[in-house]
Image (tube, helix red, strand yellow):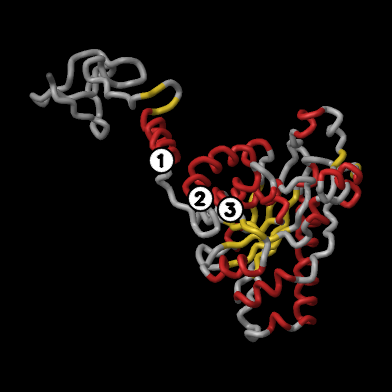
């Protein structure tokens, strides 16, 4: 059979002829197929496919499933499963932020490529969806593809399915000890000081920051001597507009609040579909903590002032991005 040598860098002498060269050094005399440039004999082999997927993709998925079934994978001391997060959750969740909420990322260059940093953001949206959007957005969009280790409340880890899933995604309980260990090993740690007060606030209070607790995140950053990166998230308030709180149902279920929205619980499960709001996530310039003495975290006045300053900075970032957004949904 004739040897095929591509003539991509050589001009064809006769239009419509096959671009292959035979073993004798002559151009093939067969007529080329439309759009290929080669005849049927010399048509380059196409990648093998299995249904709509390439054979390589299918093989990669089968290898992944085999490792899952045999237990041949690693998790760290916090239960973080890096492979599962990158190969399963990221491809599944990234398109939601990219095409459904059309997230616009600003200031990603303010997140360090390596080393510890504390990402401090506003919290809202009835369910903590904003935390997950930030986490997977940094993993997908940041040049260093870094993981954000979120600090979560104990309620998340008590829930049957959510708890194990949160652990495998790299989240951990919001305790000083765990957070310090993560920062000391050079991880990005995400914290939302508003807590339940922010995520469960009503529609009338949207984009108005609640109290930032007692400044625990400032103490944490000072002790770890890690920079603080303010994060302002616009768009989460509109996904589940909370117009009421059924406090009796919340107490019966052991929840901090029970949301009433224009669609839930009236439409049942359909009412739990988030609305397609337009998101803007901005990362502010890092605030260094290295200039403070080692025991600065014990200075209550310093902690209070820095907490208030960062809260005000995030509030101003929110207002600025709200003004730049043309519409909540378009």
Q: Nearer the viewer, residue 180 or 222?
A: 180
What is the quadrant of the N terminus in the image?
A: top left
Q: How far apart, in angstroms, are the residues tagged by discs 2 and 3? A: 17 Å
| Percent position of residue 68, x then y | 45, 40
Q: Residues within 10 Å of mark 3 (few under 14, many from 20)?
A: some
Q: Nearer the viewer, mark 2 or mark 1?
A: 1
Residue lying at 72% horizontally and 48% vertically, measured from the top left: 128
Label 2 with label 1: CB-CB less than 8 Å: no
**Residue carrying label 2:** 81
Residue lying at 78% horizontally and 66% vertically, measured from the top left: 311
Rendered image: mark on residue 267: none
The answer to whether 26 is drawn above or below residue 94 in the figure is: above
**Residue carrying label 1:** 70
| Percent position of residue 45, x then y | 28, 24
**Residue carrying label 3:** 138
- Circle 3 SS class: helix
Q: Nearer the viewer, residue 288 or 107?
A: 288
| Percent position of residue 263, x then y | 84, 32
Residue lying at 67% horizontally and 36% vertically, measured from the top left: 100
The tag earlier along the polypeptide, 3 or 1, is 1
The answer to whether 106 is drawn above or below residue 239 in the figure is: below
Q: Is residue 55 left or right of residue 101?
A: left
The answer to whether 213 is drawn above or below residue 123 in the figure is: below
Q: Image quadrant of residue 309?
A: bottom right
Q: How far apart, in angstroms, are the residues tagged by discs 3 and 1? A: 31 Å
Q: Is residue 145 left or right of residue 103?
A: left
What is the quadrant of the C terminus in the image?
A: top right
Q: Nearer the viewer, residue 328 or 212?
A: 212
């Amino acid at each position: 059979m004739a040897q095929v040598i591509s003539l991509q860098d050589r001009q064809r002498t006769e239009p419509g002829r096959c671009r292959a060269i035979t073993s004798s050094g002559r151009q093939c005399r067969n007529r080329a197929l439309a759009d290929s440039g080669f005849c049927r004999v010399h048509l380059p082999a196409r990648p093998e496919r299995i249904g709509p997927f390439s054979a390589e993709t299918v093989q990669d998925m089968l290898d992944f499933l085999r490792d899952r079934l045999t237990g041949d994978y690693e998790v760290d001391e916090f239960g973080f499963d890096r492979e599962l997060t990158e190969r399963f959750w990221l491809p599944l969740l990234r398109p939601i932020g990219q095409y459904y909420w059309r997230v616009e990322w600003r200031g990603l260059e303010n997140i360090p490529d390596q080393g510890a940093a504390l990402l401090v953001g506003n919290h809202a949206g009835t369910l903590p969806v904003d935390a997950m959007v930030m986490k997977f957005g940094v993993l997908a969009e940041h040049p260093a593809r870094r993981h954000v280790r979120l600090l979560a409340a104990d309620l998340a880890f008590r829930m049957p399915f959510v708890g194990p899933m949160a652990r495998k995604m790299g989240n951990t309980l919001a305790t000083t000890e765990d957070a310090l260990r993560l920062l000391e090993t050079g991880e990005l740690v995400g914290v939302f000081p508003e807590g339940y007060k922010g995520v469960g606030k009503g529609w009338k209070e949207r984009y108005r920051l609640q109290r930032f607790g007692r400044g625990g995140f400032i103490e944490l950053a000072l002790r770890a001597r890690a920079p603080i990166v303010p994060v302002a998230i616009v768009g989460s308030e509109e996904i589940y507009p909370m117009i009421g709180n059924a406090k009796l149902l919340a107490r019966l279920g052991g929840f901090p609040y029970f949301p009433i929205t224009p669609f839930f619980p009236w439409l049942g499960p359909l009412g739990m579909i988030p609305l397609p709001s337009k998101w803007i996530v901005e990362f502010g310039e890092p605030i260094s903590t290295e200039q403070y003495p080692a025991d600065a975290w014990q200075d209550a006045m310093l902690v209070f002032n820095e907490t208030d300053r960062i809260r005000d900075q995030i509030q101003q970032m929110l207002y600025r991005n709200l003004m730049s957004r043309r519409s909540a949904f378009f």
